[in-house]
Amino acid sequence: MTNINEALAAKIEAVKQVLVSIAAEYDSATLASSYGAEDMVLMDLICKFAPEIEIFTLDTGRLPKETYEVMQAAKAHYNREVKVFFPDAAEVEAFVTQKGPNAFYDSVELRKQCCRIRKVKPLKRALAGQKAWLTGMRRSQAVTRIELPVSEWDEAFGLQKFSPLTDWSNGDVWAYIKAFGVPYNKLHDQGVASIGCAPCTRAITAGEDIRAGRWWWENPESKECGLHVKATKI
């Protein structure tokens, strides 16, 4: 294997086995990709070992230009289809008209309403008909994810959810990207660790939590958009 240490090689092999097992056991499975570092690692591994697994992304309409750039770079690099889901235009129009374009800064409630329109509802459409979905979430990313298992039943969306990189460190992710020449979002070079919509993402400083740059005006315990929370059916 390329220049990586034994510990990372073992983690790669473990993820490979998870992906191969998902492809064999589920006739429809898909990766939800935000084109962040972890998702690019999974995209690379899926293309190598389990190409049957589909990949999709959510275009909220407020993404940074660097995210579109890595989307294009990944398409050229892997030459495979990534389905793109957009929010309902009428709902976006109504929210912006009634609340304003940056209302999400005003309260957690409005921020979650914006996320629901731009992310959660499109995700529900993306997962319709799927038996399993994969994410790039890791335990060390945030206090809301410290008990994240590799596999769990997602009650909100009614299917099995896999987080194959759950025990990977940030160092593991970047060692993989560098070793295998994986395309990545150049915002990471500017200190942005977790990338979402442009107005809700900022760079972090030394010692800050990886997701400190997401919705930085809120308390850490509320820093989920609704895609990855324990909830009743949506």
Image: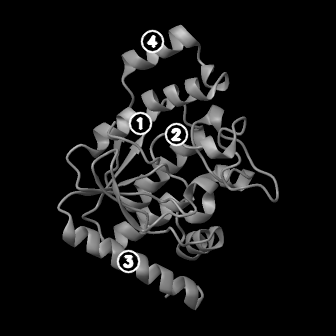
Q: Does residue 101 appear left or right of residue 11 in this picture? A: right
Name the spot of residue 45 as percent of width and height, x first: 41, 70
Where's the C terminus, which quadrant?
top left
How far is the residue under mark 1 from the one under mark 3? 28 Å
Q: Quadrant of residue 208?
A: bottom right
Residue drawn at (49%, 81%), measured in percent from left and top? 11
When the figure is inspected, residue 4 is found, relative to residue 114, above or below; the finding is: below
Residue drawn at (67%, 46%), measured in percent from left and top? 220
Label 2 is placed on what type of residue? Cys
The residue under label 4 is 94
Label 1 is placed on what type of residue? Val
Q: Does residue 144 appear left or right of residue 136 in this picture? A: right
How far is the residue under mark 4 from the one under mark 2? 20 Å
The residue under label 3 is 16
Find residue 29 and name its label.
none
The residue under label 2 is 225
Q: Outermost residue toward the front? A: 232
When the figure is inspected, residue 175 is found, relative to residue 40, above or below; the finding is: below
- Give SS at disc 4: helix
How far is the residue under mark 3 from the one under mark 2? 28 Å
Dot 3 or dot 4, earlier in sequence:
3
Residue drawn at (49%, 66%), measured in percent from left and top? 41
Q: Is residue 85 visible?
A: no
Q: Are marks 4 and 2 in contact (CB under 8 Å)?
A: no
Q: Are marks 2 and 1 in contact (CB under 8 Å)?
A: yes
- Give SS at disc 1: helix
How far is the residue under mark 1 from the one under mark 4? 17 Å
Q: Residues within 10 Å of mark 3 (few under 14, many from 20)?
A: some
Dot 1 or dot 3, earlier in sequence:
3
Find residue 120 and name its label.
1
Q: Does residue 125 appear left or right of residue 99 in this picture? A: left
